[in-house]
């Protein structure tokens, strides 16, 4: 009787494929795509969910930090993001990109938080469990940590300060597109705004950023020194 | 042209915005820079400035990036753990559907049981009510000789037929609203007293004759015009155009098949303190609670309803009596 090999047997190939799909070892999980991990998480696989958390926690935290501009709310909102991701995992539908799904949750919670903060601006923070280049978020502190060059520090600080001064919709498209590396199609899905509008916001946001850094106002006119310093 | 629309129609702006998103080093970036060099664009200086800012951002992608500390990760995972336990305790969709189904079945069974119990309670009339009422006559049957003191007229006074067949509906002027004429027991019957009201009706035709109502009421005032109805509750056996129905508190609670060619009707209402049986020719068409007040005397009688255009001679009340066991 001839010996059947995996290579020659379609049935064996199928078995191998099935084995790969069902392989729950950490190594195999680590190689899985975000979407595969999410599908495992939907079935209650907490190891898969932990990997999703590992892959996205920094992105989610950074996005929130860049958008909200304060570190106080970031921690609690980010926790809520992952809790909701776990709770509402059954609502995720493949083949939607997991990053799109996750950032939609994150953005919605950030918007809700901003509204709440407008109503009640006081926060009491007793403990922070985050790590970063500079948690203070102050442009000059961030720049000081980024480089030893005083000239570069000044440049970085001006960019960050200008970024803070952008309108929220323009800052959002820059944060999502540039810092989070999301495509216009993904941003369209997350924000519910047409891609052409997002392109326009990207262009005008960066143009405004250029003018702010160059010491000009929206119309390209020079900003007076005192005006620039005091926003 | 709308400014935003330019980013859809101008190929260079589409390329530039693609490049600005993808950043330095990307194919779009190289292509956009090439185009910017090769073409003599009106806003080339501004585009270059924008590209420079984008380069600044690229070199600072890590600006304000933060990472979770061990405390944060522990908090998230503990929250997820609690959520998993909560979900584990929560019934699945299938269980919920099955549970709802079970509740629905149970509710149906309970509703049926209530209905059956209600029906059986309605049908649970005392045995003696269905027995023979051959005892004392409360009100006599002899109407041909005139209405005795046990009876009183209500509404328009019914009239004796010329050939002494019995009482006929009073003749009234034509009217839209039917007018009542009839007899009721002169005295009230104690609510605890079981009795039988019996009427025999003769007809020569079923249509174009007055309606007849055999009734038991818990109010002796029949002055409500034009139908000579009482102000209280009534249980009524109502014959109209060959159709007999039983009405309680204005609602039909029983009926007999239409018998338009029937020329004689023997109607009885057996009444106890709480229940009643309505029969036609000895066949029960209603058996249940009569709905009369438990503490008020009962008045039994018969009522003709006419609009003044029916053939009153074609229907007569041959006999009417009230018996007790």
Image (cartoon, rainbow, N blue to C red):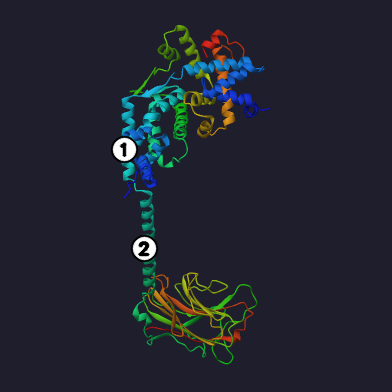
The one of B219 and B6 positioned closer to us in this rendering? B6
Can you say whether A56 is above or below B197 in the image? above
Q: Is residue B211 positioned above or below B64 on the image?
A: below
A193, above or below B129, in the image: above
Q: Position of residue B311 (x, y in %)?
A: 62, 84
Tag 1 subunit:
B
Find residue B110 and name its label: 2
Q: Give coordinates of residue B9: x percent, y percent.
A: 65, 29
Q: Quadrant of residue A206?
A: top right
The answer to whether one can see residue A62 in this image is yes
Q: Which mark is residue B82?
A: 1
Which element carries disc 2, helix, strand or loop?
helix
Which residue extends farthest front? Answer: A1
Q: CA distance from mark 2 to mark 1?
A: 39 Å
Left or right of residue B96: residue A231? right
Are there few (<14), some (14-19), or many (20+) residues within 10 Å of tag 1?
Answer: few
Q: Nearer the viewer, residue B44 or B276?
A: B44
Name the spot of residue A10 as percent of width and height, x first: 39, 46
């Amino acid at each position: 009787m001839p010996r059947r090999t995996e290579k020659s047997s379609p049935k064996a190939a199928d078995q191998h494929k099935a084995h790969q799909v069902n392989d729950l070892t950490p190594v195999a999980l680590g190689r899985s795509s975000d979407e595969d991990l999410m599908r495992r998480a939907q079935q209650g696989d907490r190891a898969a969910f932990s990997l999703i958390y590992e892959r996205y926690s920094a992105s989610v935290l950074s996005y929130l930090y860049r958008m909200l501009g304060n570190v106080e709310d970031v921690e609690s909102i980010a926790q809520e993001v992952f809790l909701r991701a776990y709770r509402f995992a059954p609502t995720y539908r493949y083949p939607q990109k997991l990053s799109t799904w996750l950032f939609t949750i994150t953005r919605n919670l950030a918007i809700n938080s901003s509204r709440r903060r407008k109503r009640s601006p006081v926060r009491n923070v007793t403990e922070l469990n985050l790590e970063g280049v500079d948690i203070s978020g102050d442009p000059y502190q961030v720049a000081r940590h980024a480089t030893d060059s005083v000239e570069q520090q000044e440049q970085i600080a001006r960019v960050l300060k200008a970024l803070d001064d952008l309108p929220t919709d323009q800052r959002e498209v820059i944060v999502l597109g540039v810092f989070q590396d999301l495509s216009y199609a993904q941003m369209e899905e997350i924000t519910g705004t047409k891609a052409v509008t997002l392109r326009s916001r990207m262009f005008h946001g960066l143009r405004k950023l250029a003018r702010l850094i160059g010491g000009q106002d929206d119309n390209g006119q020079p900003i007076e020194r005192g005006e620039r310093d005091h926003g | 042209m709308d400014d935003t629309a330019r980013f859809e129609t101008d190929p260079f702006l589409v390329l530039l915005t693609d490049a600005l998103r993808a950043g330095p080093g990307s194919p779009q970036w190289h292509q956009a820079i090439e185009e910017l060099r090769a073409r003599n664009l009106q806003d080339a200086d501004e585009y270059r400035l924008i590209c420079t800012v984008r380069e600044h951002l690229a070199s600072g992608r890590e600006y304000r990036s933060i990472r979770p500390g061990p405390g944060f990760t522990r908090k998230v995972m503990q929250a997820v753990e609690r959520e998993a336990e909560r979900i584990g305790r929560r019934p699945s969709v299938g269980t919920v559907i099955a549970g709802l189904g079970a509740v629905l079945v149970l509710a149906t069974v309970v509703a049926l049981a209530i209905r059956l119990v209600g029906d059986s309670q309605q049908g649970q009339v005392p045995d003696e009510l269905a027995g023979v009422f051959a005892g004392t006559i409360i009100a006599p049957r002899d109407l041909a000789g005139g209405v005795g003191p046990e009876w009183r007229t209500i509404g328009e006074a019914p009239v004796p037929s010329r050939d002494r067949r019995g009482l006929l509906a009073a003749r009234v002027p034509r009217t839209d609203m039917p007018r009542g004429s009839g007899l009721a027991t002169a005295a009230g019957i104690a609510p605890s007293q079981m009795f039988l009201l019996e009427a025999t009706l003769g007809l020569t035709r079923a249509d174009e004759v007055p309606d007849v109502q055999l009734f038991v009421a818990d109010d002796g005032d029949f002055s409500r015009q034009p139908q000579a109805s009482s102000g209280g509750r009534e249980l009524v056996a109502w014959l109209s155009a060959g159709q007999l129905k039983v009405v309680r508190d204005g609602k039909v609670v029983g009926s007999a098949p239409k018998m338009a060619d029937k020329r004689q009707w023997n109607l009885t209402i057996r009444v106890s303190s709480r229940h009643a049986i309505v029969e036609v020719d000895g066949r029960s068409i209603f058996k249940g609670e009569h709905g009369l007040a438990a503490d008020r005397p009962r008045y039994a009688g018969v009522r003709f309803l006419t609009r003044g255009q029916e053939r009153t001679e074609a229907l007569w009340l041959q006999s009417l009596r009230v018996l007790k066991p």
